[in-house]
Amino acid sequence: MWVAMFFVFLEGTFASAFLPVFMQQDLHLSLPQAEAWSGPMIAFPNLAMFLAQPLWGMYADRHGRKRIVIIGVVSCSLLRALWTFAHSPLTLVVLGIFAGALGAGVVAGQAIVASATPRERMGEVMGKLQTAMTVGFLIGPVVGQACAAAIGPRATFLMQAVFALTGAIILGRFVEERFQKPEQAERANVVEVLTRDLRPLVGNRQLQALWVTSFVVFLGWSSMWPIMTYYVQTIGVPLEHVAAYAAYVMLAVGVCQTVSVPWLGRLGDRVGQKRVLVGTMLFAGFFLLPHALVRTYAQFFGLRLLATAAGGGVNPTTSALAARAMPRSRYGGTYGVLASARSLAAAIGPLVGSNLAAFGNIRWVFLWTGVLTMGAGLWAQWAVKEEG
């Protein structure tokens, strides 16, 4: 599963470093126009994912999670490969929306692993799985910009599908799913399905607290997604080197989180997941604030390492705490609901970040993110219980 998810998330961020340059050079957008379009390009697919995840989560709990992950990976990768033929930012947005809706079932991969993991090792195992997502997510831009430099951006869009399909093949061939189909599955319409999947959120205070925590922190972090490459351009890196320099930051962050995330997961198993969750958010938020003051690429590089090394601990700790609050039979729906918080945040945050950059000051995005991250840490200290 680790190798499969690495390839899947590698594909997911393949274009993130060179896409801002592609929009300026190939689609002939100005810098403010490209910044403004970058928000919807990230936000609307995540909104579609937010709406689709509970449906996929319930289907996974009924019929098996493995097939849902494979369907999501294949559909999403093929739709993003069609960016090859796009000649307007609107086309990129529309294809991204369909990819988000059909690819939302990928979150069921966490449930496959969680269903075979002892509860006392949940933090460690979820931390290790998170490194696959993190490393793929952050190495993807490096591979993508290298391909774009070698064969051009449009051919690189086609290359995306190859990596995701590799992950789907590995998943289908080598991952064993421990799944028992329910003896009797209830029948429900779409509204009832959405209500059923959200029912644990309504009746479980621990899950409510984790949902709010995830939403607030990812609202801030997702605000940075559309502007990272533009910020590298803003602090003086020439346009022809922007994609590579942005990718180098992402690669370094990925290596750093490869080390820090599993360690934070194991630390949570020993000293308490809540303590690690709160500490990582306060630490990350504190080092996000001075991002707004940097003047050189080296300063930006160093602060990114400090902030993201700690920030990577949020997902495995919330996943472990959620697992302790729910029975194994409901893991698919539970992770679907928890992921919906991140998806809803990712549907709002990029719009905030891109508009702050396009119509205000790009540096304000980091102040906003730092304040929200520290606020989420204070909320978790008050609302989240150590045991679900």
Image (tube, grey):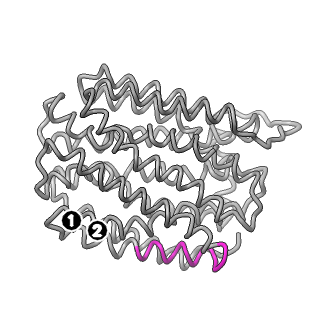
Position of 211 compared to 284: left or right?
right
Q: Is residue 264 above or below residue 297?
A: below
Main SS of the magenta part reads helix
Q: Which residue carries the number 1 mark?
A: 298
Q: Is residue 115 above or below residue 120?
A: above
Q: Residue at the front extreme?
A: 150
For badge 1, the amino acid type reads Ala
Whole-percent x, y for residue 291 in the image: 25, 68
For badge 2, the amino acid type reads Gly
In the image, which residues are magenta? Answer: 269-283
Could you tell me which secondary element the residue under label 1 belongs to?
helix
Whole-percent x, y for residue 263 in the image: 56, 69
Q: Is residue 374 above or below residue 326?
A: below
Q: Which residue occupies the foreground of this view, 166 or 283?
A: 166
What number of labels is visible? 2
Q: Check if residue 274 falls in the magenta segment.
A: yes
Whole-percent x, y for residue 30 in the image: 11, 38
* Classed neighbour count for the residue bearing mark 1: other residues with Cα under 10 Å, few (<14), some (14–19), many (≥20): few
* Classed neighbour count for the residue bearing mark 2: other residues with Cα under 10 Å, few (<14), some (14–19), many (≥20): some
Q: Do the residues labelled 2 and 1 touch (CB within 8 Å)?
A: yes
Whole-percent x, y for residue 102 in the image: 53, 31
Could you tell me which secondary element the residue under label 2 belongs to?
helix
Residue 254 occupies quadrant: bottom left
Position of 127 compared to 247: left or right?
right
Residue at left offset 55%, top offset 75%: 276
Disc 2 and disc 1: Cα gap in Å? Answer: 6 Å
Residue at left offset 13%, top offset 52%: 237
